[in-house]
Image (tube, grey):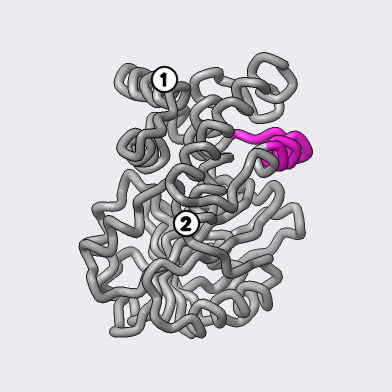
Amino acid sequence: MTYGIIGTGAVGGYFGAKLAKNGCDVHFLLHRDYDVVASQGLQVQSCNGDFLLKPVQAYASAGDMPKCDVVLVALKSVNEHLLRTLLPPLLKSDTLVVLVQNGIGLEEDVQQWFPGTSLAAGLAFICASKTQPGVVRHECFGSINIGNYSCPDPQRIEQLVADLCAADVEAHVVDYHLARWRKAVWNMPFNGLTVVMNAQTDQLLLNPATEQLVRDLMLEIVGAARHLGVTALDEAFAEKMIEMTRAMVPYWPSMKLDYDFHRPMEIHYLYTRPLQMARNAGRPMPKLEMLEAQLRFLEQNHR
C-alpha cells in the first residue's frame, strides 16, 4: 500500500519512518524542516535503537504528493482546518484516512468536510518529541490502536495493522469509541496539569496531592464516558494508567511543549469538545472544566 504522512512531527515522523524502514512506500509532507529532511534524511533517536531514514520521499506541498491508499494525519488538532486543502490531492475513492491526533470529535468534523471518505482513529501510546529539524526523539512505548469510524472495508484496516506490526510497531484494531475515551483518560489530566503545574509526569505522581488530583480527573472522564455509553471503561483502567505513567520515563507531554514554544495548545478537541459532550449528556466534569479555564487563561497571557 502507498502511505501518506500529513504532519511529520514526532508521532507522524516516527510511525512513517518505521513503515518506510521496513520497505513500505511512504510519502512525507513537511513544513518547517522540509529542506533538512530532503537533504539529510529523517533521524530517529529511539530507545529501541537509532536509525536514519535516507533518502526520504519528502514534499513541501500536498499538491505534489501521489494518491495514497492510507493517509496518516498527525497534524496538531489546532491545524485541523488545513485538512480541507491538504487531504484532497492524496485521496482516491477508497483511501483510508487515519487521524492520529489527540481529542474527541475529530472524525465527526472531518467526515462533514469529506462525506464519502473512509475514516479511522489512530490512538498512539508513545513518548516522543521533535525539538530540532529532522530529528525524532522516541523515549518509550510506541504502540498504536486503530479504531474504525466509517471505513466499509475492514480488510484495509487489517492490512494497515499488519504493515505496522511487520515494521516492529505494536498495533491493534480496537473499538472506536472505547479507544478515543481511553486515550482521553491519560491525555486530559496529564497534558493540562503539566502546563498548569509546570511539572513533569513523574513529579505529578510523586506528590500525594497532585497524584490524587490526577486520579480524580481520570475518574471524571471514566464516569462521563460510561454515561455516554462506553461501558467497557472502568475505574480499574484509571489505576492502570497511573501505574503505567509511574513506570515510564519523566515526560513533558505535547501540550507542555506547545506552551513552552509559544504555540497554540490543543484545548478545543482535548477539553472543550468532550466537556461539552459530557454537559449535554447530563454528566459534567467540573474539575476538568476548571483545568480548561486555567489553560485558556495561560494561553491568552503567554503569547
Q: Mark 1 points at which residue?
A: 290
Residue 36 drawn at (x, y percent) = 47, 57
Residue 136 drawn at (x, y percent) = 58, 52
Q: Which mark is residue 110?
A: none
Q: Residue furthest top?
A: 209
Q: Residue 177 carries which label?
A: 2
Position of 33 with respect to 93 (left or right) is right
Residue 41 can be seen, yes or no: no
Is 141 rendered above or below residue 186? below
Disc 1 vs disc 2: which is toward the camera? 2
Is 10 rendered above or below residue 191? below
Residue drawn at 52 percent across, 37 percent down = 223
Q: Does the magenta stretch include residue 57?
A: no
Position of 202 with respect to 288 (left or right) is right
Quarter of the figure with residue 268: top left
Quarter of the figure with residue 44: bottom right
Q: Nearer the viewer, residue 268 or 261?
A: 268
Give the magenta part as a residue range. Answer: 239-252
Residue drawn at 40 percent across, 48 percent down = 104
Residue type (three-letter) at the residue carrying disc 1? Met
As helix, strand or loop, the secondary structure at mark 2 comes to helix
